[in-house]
Image: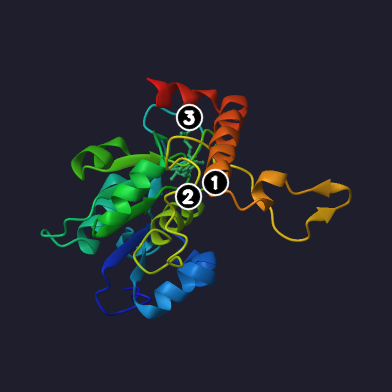
Amino acid sequence: MSEPIVPDAAPWRATVLTLYPEMFPGPLGHSLSGDALARGTWSLEPRQIREHGLGRHRNVDDTPAGGGAGMVLRCDVLGAAIDAATPADDARPRLLMSPRGKPLSQARVRALAEGPGAIIVCGRFEGVDERVIEARNLEEVSIGDYVLSGGEIAALVLIDACVRLLPGVMGKHASGVEESFEGGLLEYPHYTRPREWEGRTIPDVLMGGNHAAIARWRADRSRALTRARRPDLLQRDES
Ligand code: SAM
């Protein structure tokens, strides 16, 4: 059985069921998430689905019922892997990374970050047998309208988005509340030194020290950017 990366019970726990546990922590072992992992702010337990595979070759997949291309992750194998990873009193939500899931939103990320963690199943091949999704109450989560070759990168995305919101992970000045999506809008543009670069200058209002004017400018830019790039967000904001 795979060992948790931080063995002690951390406040926020991610268990990842995967055929590629060596892909974890991967990028999550660096920077903010890596430091927080080392501090024990969160823990990561990658678990090898194949440990529950069948026969000498530990088979995990089979051909699709009804025919068609590719292979399907077996419900009995995945069911056993989920059961072994989750005691009956485990209150964490069970997520299945899936392109047909509900698109991941900042609101869902925040709700997950405020909870005890998540059990995350990474699909491979053509996907997983529908019966295990129903029987183990898996919530399908998509990270976007495109198809990845496996759920691992999607799981890394989801965990990263959650972990940066955990208490103490970001600096106290960067609470995340002003970021894109938090207020239903995209974030305003940022600038830093030098004041002039290749003939482009920092907008005067940002250099004037008038905090009310700066806040107004940022709100205007935020709304204009959202209108240009993501009018769907604005409609939600105005409805
Ligand atoms: N046949 C599936 C379909 O058309 O919906 C795609 C399967 S994909 C090749 C293999 C696995 O990658 C999926 O089971 C899922 O775990 C993961 N995956 C692919 N795209 C994803 C996305 N946009 N969001 C989350 N997970 C994704």
Q: Amino acid at mark 2?
A: Ala
Q: Which residue is mark 3?
A: 68
Front residue of this view, candidates 98 and 69:
98
Q: Is mark 1 within 8 Å of ligand 1?
A: yes
Disc on the earlier residue, 3 or 2: 3
Colour scheme of the picture: rainbow
Residue type at the position of mark 1: Ser
Residue located beneath label 1 in the image: 149
In front: label 2 or label 1: 2
Q: Using the image as rendered, state which of residue 174 and residue 213 is in the foreground.
A: 213
Q: Secondary structure at mark 2?
A: helix
Query: Which residue occupies 37% across, 20% down?
Result: 239
- Say which of 111 and 7 sits in front: 111
20 with respect to 203 (left or right): left
Q: Is 238 situated above or below 206? A: above
Residue linked to disc 2:
154
Which mark sits nearer the N-terminus, 2 or 1? 1
Badge 1, how many Cα within 10 Å: few under 14, some, many 20+?
few
**Mark 3: C-beta under 8 Å from nearest atom of ligand 1:** no
Q: x, y (%) of residue 220?
A: 57, 33
The quadrant in which residue 40 appears is bottom left
As drawn, 29 above or below 218: below
Question: Of helix, strand and loop, which one carries label 3?
Answer: loop
Q: Quadrant of the N terminus?
A: bottom left
* Inter-mark Cα distance, 3 to 2: 25 Å
Asked whether the viewer can see residue 85, the reply is yes
Q: Residue 176, located in which quarter of the rendered image?
A: bottom left
Look at label 3 and name its amino acid.
Answer: Gly
